[in-house]
Image: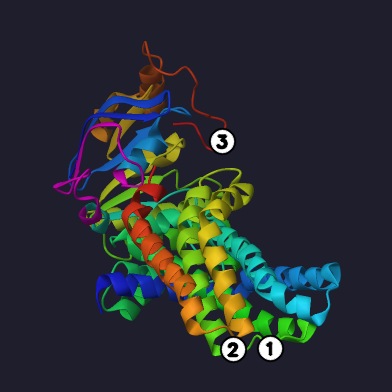
Amino acid sequence: MITVTRLVKRFGYKTVLRGLDLQVEQGEFVALLGPNGAGKTTLIRILATLSRPTLGQVQIAGYDLSRQAALIRRSLGVVSHLPLLYGDLSAEENLRFYGRMYSVSPLERRVSEVLDQVGLASRRRDLVRTFSRGMQQRLAIGRAILHDPRILLLDEPHTGLDQEACDMLDLVLRGVVAHGRTVVMTSHDLVRVADLASRFDVLSGGVIRASTHRAGLAEDGLLAFYRKAIQEPGAASQPVDFSGPGQSL
Amino acid sequence: MSQFLKATYAILWKDLTAERRSRELLSAMLVFALLVIFIFNFALELNIQVRATVTSGVLWVTLAFAGTLGLNRSMAVEKDRGCLDGLLLAPVDRTAIYFGKMLANLVFMLLVAVIVLPIYSILYNTNLLLPGLGLVILLGAYGYVAVGTLLASMAVQARTRDILLPILLFPVVIPLVVAAVKASGGILEGVPLGEILPWLNLLVVYDVLFSAVALMVFDFVVEE
């Protein structure tokens, strides 16, 4: 579903991705882990066609990113730590707007379905600026799945959410995965991704340092796997923040 | 309706609906425009004949400054909540995004002109409610937002976007403002159409040229 070959991304003199390879199969839920500055967001932005690769090849859903970006965008739903929603529009107006941009049909029925799915049907006419961060993020997921994309790209979707909002978000994500969509999610929260993802890739120093499926994890779990991966020679030394609530694995 | 037109209309609808709720952009543009004409009114202290000769210049300075304010705000709204990414993720020709934003900016600028013109007419004791002047304002405002929307899309990526846009925009719109001032002045003084026509032609050429440039480069301007 996603094939990345020798991907390089440079911003001026700074090289963020250094020949990264990645293969994601259909229906997989891949968690991209790594310290700050590892290149996770850059990778997600390239996969989302928001940023051009400097070198390398990217194929998504059978399309080449450099030549068929518009076709790729139809297959993608993207959630970032920003909601990508308009505060002065209501929840349903936001979805209606994005529905028109994606030519969703029948639009009104799909908007109602999605609002039900993310638990915001009762707030459909309220302006988004009156929503809590958690509600905005749920609506952001609704926006991302509105056109029924085959691939979901999530860039630290739990950032800034409280425990309850995170749980609600996870519930929505499980529903999304149950529909067979391919998901790539970046996160710093190892506990949450341990429950959600089917595969874990550790990105550090601009390349994938290690990769394992959930079934392949040793007894000491994801935390040990992650620590070992980022301590490899050449990996970035900055560790992930384990100080959040409920971080024991 | 093609997907291009649907997307353009959706963005126009979105901008107008959001502005109808918040009134942030229009009120800022309008207050600024009124302040400028009030300041000129008191600062120039001219007799009625001299006032008639500076009217077109003052009018276009007012519209240009207020327009810059609107252009900056229009793109900042998209950038601050990540909505520009939301637009760029849509599977539509990205020039539809440009034209949607540009048309919304044009509507805002024309609304400001519609409100400013009668007030200006009273303050400066000059009749500005002329069909010919309306046409010049339409052509001038179109050219201004055509190039302004493109440059605002570029400037919004920078931390210094508020000061960057005027620095980028004003040198590029000099030919447009000169043509608009000359054409407006000609219409207000009642000179024959033949003398105004070259300036009107320049406005049309400018509008077409910068619409074409935006069509070609917008995709590169907004992508990293």
Residue A123 can be seen in this image: no
Q: Which label number is shown at residue B127?
A: 1
Image vertical order of residue B196 relative to residue B122, above or below: above
- Real-space Cα distance between discs 1 and 3? 68 Å
Chain letter of the residue beneath label 1 in the structure image? B
Q: Which label number is shown at residue A244?
A: 3
Amino acid type shown at disc 3: Gly
Residue B193 can be seen in this image: yes
**Residue situated in front as seen by the camera: A4 or A179:** A4
Q: Which label number is shown at residue B130?
A: 2
Which region of the structure is painted magenta?
Answer: A47-71
Amino acid type shown at disc 2: Leu
**Residue situated in front as seen by the camera: B203 or A132:** B203
Q: Which label number is shown at residue A24?
A: none
Chain letter of the residue beneath label 3 in the structure image? A
Q: Quadrant of the N terminus of chain B?
A: bottom left
Q: Are marks 1 and 2 on the same chain?
A: yes
- Real-space Cα distance between discs 1 and 2? 7 Å
Is B130 situated left or right of A108 in this image? Answer: right
